[in-house]
Structures are given as C-alpha cells and as structure tokens.
Amino acid sequence: MRCEVVAIGTELLLGQITDTNSSWIGEQLALVGIDSFYQTKVGDNLARIIVTLRLALERSEAVICCGGLGPTQDDITREAIAAVMGVRLARDPVLAERIRAIFAARGRVMPENNLRQADVPEGAGPIKEMPGTAPGLICPVGAKVIYAVPGVPHEMRDMMLGTILPDLQRRAGVQAVIRSRVLRTWGQSESGLAELLAERIEALDRTPSATLAFQASGIEGIKVRITAKAADVATAEAILKEEEATVRAILGDCIFGIDSQTMESVVLDLLRARGLTLAVAESVTGGLVGARLTAVPGASDVLKGAIVSYASAVKFDLLGVPEGPVVTAEAAAAMAAGVRRRLGADVGLATTGVAGPAEQEGQPAGTVYLGLAYGAQSEARLVRLPGDRNRVRQYAVISLLDFLRQTLLAEA
Amino acid sequence: MRCEVVAIGTELLLGQITDTNSSWIGEQLALVGIDSFYQTKVGDNLARIIVTLRLALERSEAVICCGGLGPTQDDITREAIAAVMGVRLARDPVLAERIRAIFAARGRVMPENNLRQADVPEGAGPIKEMPGTAPGLICPVGAKVIYAVPGVPHEMRDMMLGTILPDLQRRAGVQAVIRSRVLRTWGQSESGLAELLAERIEALDRTPSATLAFQASGIEGIKVRITAKAADVATAEAILKEEEATVRAILGDCIFGIDSQTMESVVLDLLRARGLTLAVAESVTGGLVGARLTAVPGASDVLKGAIVSYASAVKFDLLGVPEGPVVTAEAAAAMAAGVRRRLGADVGLATTGVAGPAEQEGQPAGTVYLGLAYGAQSEARLVRLPGDRNRVRQYAVISLLDFLRQTLLAEA
C-alpha cells in the first residue's frame, strides 16, 4: 500500500509557511507500515493541482491532500478533486447546516462564502471529525482514494488519527507494524559510524529483521535509527531491543541517549542519580551551557547556577583565576574550580576559548579549553572545533557536557 | 523562468526531519522573481530520484536538488544526476584533494568513503562555495540545469546565495531588479501592524512602486518586508528608502532594526555608542540573555558578564537579594542592582519568573519580572508571556532587551 501526500498552497512554495503537515503525515504512515514514496507541494492553481493529483494516483493507491479547503476563492482543492473524479460538486445540505451551526455557536455572522465549504464532489463523503469549519473529504477514484484535509495542523491531525489512518489500514489489510528507536551518539563522524557498523548493516541486509540508518544532527550529534517491521507490536519491540543491544555492543559509550533524550538531560540525570550539584563558568559559550541545562524542566535540583565571566576581570575577581592569559588549560581548570567554590557545588565546569571570527591571544577560532573540577581534581581538555562562531560555541557546549558524562561513567 | 525544488532523503518522507530547505529556497526564488510551481520530496531510492528529476526537468528550466550528497551508501544524488544526464561519474582530483585537506586541517583521519563526495557527473562542475566536505554541483542537461546542494542548511544557503541565485538570474536574463528590506518590530501583533498600515497598503495597491508584507517570526518579533521592483538597482534602492521612511513615520519605535539586525545587536550598539557596560543576572532565562548577547561578535567591549542565579541561595549570597520570595518585582530590581555592583558595570539587567510547566511561588507559568538598574534607579516590569517553557524563556530575553532599548531611547 502506497500513499502520497500533496500539500496545496502558494504560500508553501513561497516559503511563507513551512510545510510541517507532510512530515507529520509521513511519520504516521510509516508507523502503520504504509509506504509514502513521494510528497509534493503545489500552489493554488487548478490545472497544476489536477496534474499533481493524477500523477500521485497513478503511482500510489491513496493520496492525502492537505490544504485549499477554506472558504475563499483561492481554495480550489474541492474543484480539483471533482475534476480528477470526473464528477460535479454538489452542496451537501447536512454539511451546510453544520457550518451555519458552528458560526451561530460562536455568535458570529456567517459570510455566504463559507457555504462553499459544504460543496462535495458527487460520490465523495465527509470525514466525521470536523474540528473547524472545513469538512474533510473521502473521495473514491475507482479502487483508489483521495483524502482531503484542511491545512490547519490540529484539524488535519484529528482527521488523520480518527478516520484516515484506520481507513488506510483497512484498505491495505495491513497486519505489519513498524517501530523505531533512535540511538544518539557523540564523538564519531557519520562515516566513522558507518564503518563501525558496516558489517552489521550487511548482515541485516541478508536477513532483514531490522534496518539501521544514520541521521546527522550537527551540534546534537549523529543519530542511529533502528527500525523494525513485524506482525505485531510485541515482536517489533523485541526486535528493537535485541538490535539496540547489538549496536550498543559495537558503538559503546559514544551512545549518550535514546529517542528524545538530549546530552543535557542525560548529564542532569547522571548527576541527580549521584546526588551531585553543578556550577558552570562560561567564557566562550557566554551562557549557552546554562541556557541548555535550564531548558530541561527540573534542572534546578542539580544546577546551582553559572557565572558568565566574559570580561577577563570577572575571571580574576570572581572566579580567582590567576591573572594572565585566559585561553589556556590552566585558566579553564581554575575557572571550573572557582565557580564550584563560589556557588558551593560538587562539580564545576568551565569553557574558555576563541569563538571567532577573530583570533585571540594568538590562538585561532575554534580553540576551546574545557575545564572540569570534581573531587580532588581540576583538569582541562583542549578541543579544536569546526565552523562559524555559532557552531564553535554550540559544539563547545555539547563537548563540555560529554566530558563530564565520560568522567562520571568512567568512575562507575 | 521556472525552477523546481527536489528534496532528497527517506528521513524527510518519514518525518524524522522537516524539510525547511525547500521553503527557504522557495522564498529566495520568489525574491528574485523566479517561479517555483512544484516542490517534491523523494526518498533515497535511485529509480525514484531519477524519475522525479526527469519530471521536474520536463516542467521547468531548472531544478535545485537538495540532500543525498554525503559520503555514505545511501547518498546517491550524484548517481541519479549522472543517469539523468546520460553520463558517468568521474572522480575529480581537485575536489578529492580539497576533502583530504579539510580532514587534515581538523586533525582527523579521513575515512576512504569520503572520497565518494569527489565523484562528479561528466560535464558537471563544482559550486565554488564549499563550507563542508560535500561539494555542490552545477549539472547542465541540454539547455536546462540541475543544481545539487547538500541538505545541511548553512552549506546549502552559502551555495544558493553565492552561486545558484546569480546563475539563475543570468540564465533568466532577468532585467528587473528586485530589492527588499525587512523592518523588524517588537511589541505589536500582526493584526495590530496590519491595522496601522492598512491605509498605506491600499495606497500602494493603487500605484505599485513597492509592496509590504508581514512575516511573523515568533520570538524574534514580526517582520515588515518592503519589496521594490525597478529597472535598475539605484531606482529600487531609492524606492526602498522612501518607503522605509513612510513606514517608520507610521510605526515609530516598535521598529527595532532592519534586515539582519537583531534585538541583541541593536542593544549592544546603543550601549556602545553611549560608552556603557552591561551585566546580567538571569534566573528564569538561565543563561539565554548572555548567550544571545555573546552570539554577536564584539560583545566583549560592552558585556562584562552574567550571573545565572538559578538556586535562590545564589541570588541571596552573590547578588544580595533580600531573602524571601524570588518571583517578585523587588527581587528582579535587586538582582539587576546586585549584578551591576558585583561585575562593576554601568547597567544591570535581570530576569526572574516561571518558565513552566509547573507554577512557582503560586504564580502561573509565563509570569516574568524584568529588572533594570541604570543611573540612580532600579526598576522592574511585569510581563505575562504565552507559550511553552522554551517560548516563555525566549520571549523573556527579547522583552528584557527591549525594556533596556526603550529606556535608552527615552533619555535621548
């Protein structure tokens, strides 16, 4: 069973709105095991919408088209579908009444235009969910089908979950379920991971119980996605679990979390489990470490605070860094120790370096020292980070948190 | 001139990544007057990529395809384009050397896989911008053209702005030049701006020298874009200048900057012009104010630093806030005064509030007090911000900076 998605609206092509609906629909289709090989954006132009729907119906058994169901003259999805079906539009009196009732309930006068939304291609029927004034439509085309849903995300979602996905599964006679899990890594390049996992991927190609795919997410590391297809949820989950264990045995500690876990949430959890509190001294990152940690609800039981010692004087006066050059391993270690002492925390972290574009203290952009004060030790690590100012700073944040993560894991 | 966009990647169809590249490309094409009637997403499947590129080339004179240029086995855009061109791939020794050099400069060993990125369809040439390891390609197909760019947004953007847009304009023989300027606003809703500018927009509809459009950008405020089309650059710039003056006369101080100016760069410039230094105390924003200010190169001559007083004890001990409730106007003002004193700055700013999801001190999520210490005064302002934890924190940052901006402008 193949289902294409067609997103309709000139504003999508012009980039005034990003089409997030297709992504969400694609994800839902994948979860129930329906293939979606093409997704198309097309503007509010009757001829081009018709061509697009026809092509989609040639290639796939079902099409979900999104948008163009509003009351205005440029909302022409209904007309386009009628043309593809070879039928006329007829006003549905039940829908017309429902639309009138919605306006009445909101105490508003209904512009006559809005009744266009009750026009339905002959042979098509409305989707039962109708959270707004735009009815969704199920439009049979021979043995195939076009579903029309509004572009308003929450209206579209209600119709997808309530009617379209169950209808597609019924049509497909689908038994298979698909489940996936993301392993999040830091410290290996995409090609490095590919080499490490090459043998495993080849083995999976021969006996396909699961598939592995990589997804670079820049400053968030690289994701390894495991996808399993099986006859039922329990089997799919069991395949995922086994494959996760296999991949973990190969990749080891560069996996820092799964699915929606972030480096910051993982580090906060590690500290919380050990009953440790944290303080951060930031120079090159300028507050980003604090900002990312405090983005996690509940960070306050671990994080005491941070000192952004942007001016060197603040490093010397408030953190007790010895006067002298500040882009050094010694300064990073002293900052970490200073902020730990100053804020009364168990662990101190620090960044000092050169974000660019200009060099500083004779060191090139991308030079960053990471400081860590923990137990009796203060230490520092030098990293050379690629990219522009923003990327250097963001890479410094995740590198710093990973430094702490590796240190905590090593003592366990 | 018509140009389609093809976004390549199974992860796009599966909704693991939202395709924002096509939207951005569509916006850029519209700005230079090139039509984009179809934008298609297709997975990492050779046959389907080839079919999609062929169809796009039938309908349009140019195609920009985005993604699938990485080093791994599922990156097959190069192969697909070669098939559409009817040529072979050949390894480009210059590109291969460039890729080796990038790895060497980063002190990393290059996996042999990466040399696949130097494979180029015969007759195609590299795009000169190459911010990552994936070269972009210009691939002539008869009189038409396919451009291939990486899916990494900043790499794609460099290539679009530096090479592809100028090349498309040259091919289109576009004479008319289009120039646009963005006026960035804070403090008015989109409908509020539309009401204020309604009369002006009507006047422009009658004698179209320029057009005005709104673009909500959430935590960055709302943009008013002025677009002028004229026979030459000088005329277009003159129209922009005149229209900007007209819009400024109507909107006044809610315009905080133009084009790429941000609230933080504007505030740093205002402080720098007055010879003032700044210190920030952050609770609810957790480092975001510091992070945004230090994202601007040269922030160090204004910003002394910041203290993220996440734990209440840090507010009391380090900032001298009187012990007691901390989500109050008094605490915000005391934090601003405390950080100014502690870091020896001329101006102190502070945030304290409730980001959510849980309430705090009996106050609902979205309650934020902004503190400002300047001259003989310490004052505070209460704002109630909408949205989830992330949006509340981001809105708090820009509201705080705007508070300072308005204060500095008022004394001038």
Image (cartoon, coloured by chain):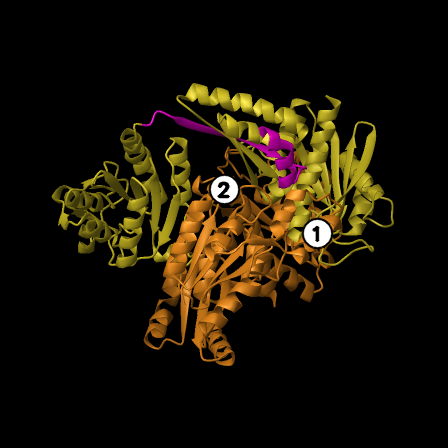
Chain colours: A yellow, B orange
Q: Does the magenta stretch include residue A193?
A: yes
**Residue at mark 1 to residue at mark 2: CA–CA distance:** 46 Å
Quick check: can you spot residue A187?
yes
Kind of residue sitting beneath label 1: Ile
The chain under label 2 reads: B
Residue at 66% x, 27% y is: A252
The mark that comes first in sequence, 1 or 2, is: 1
Give the mark toward the camera: 1 or 2. 1
Q: Mark 2 points at which residue?
A: B366
Kind of residue sitting beneath label 2: Gly
Q: In which quarter of the image is residue B15?
A: top left
- Image check: B75 left or right of B277? left
Give the extent of the magenta segment.
A174-200
Query: Tag 2's secondary structure?
Result: loop
Q: Is residue A16 magenta?
A: no
Query: Tag 1's secondary structure?
Result: helix
Image x and y of residue B112, in percent? 67, 43
- Establish if B409 lies above or below B290: below
Closer-to-camera residue (A286/B251): A286
Residue at 40% x, 39% y is: A26
Image x and y of residue B342, in percent? 75, 47
Q: Mark 1 points at which residue?
A: B102
- Image check: A65 left or right of B355? left
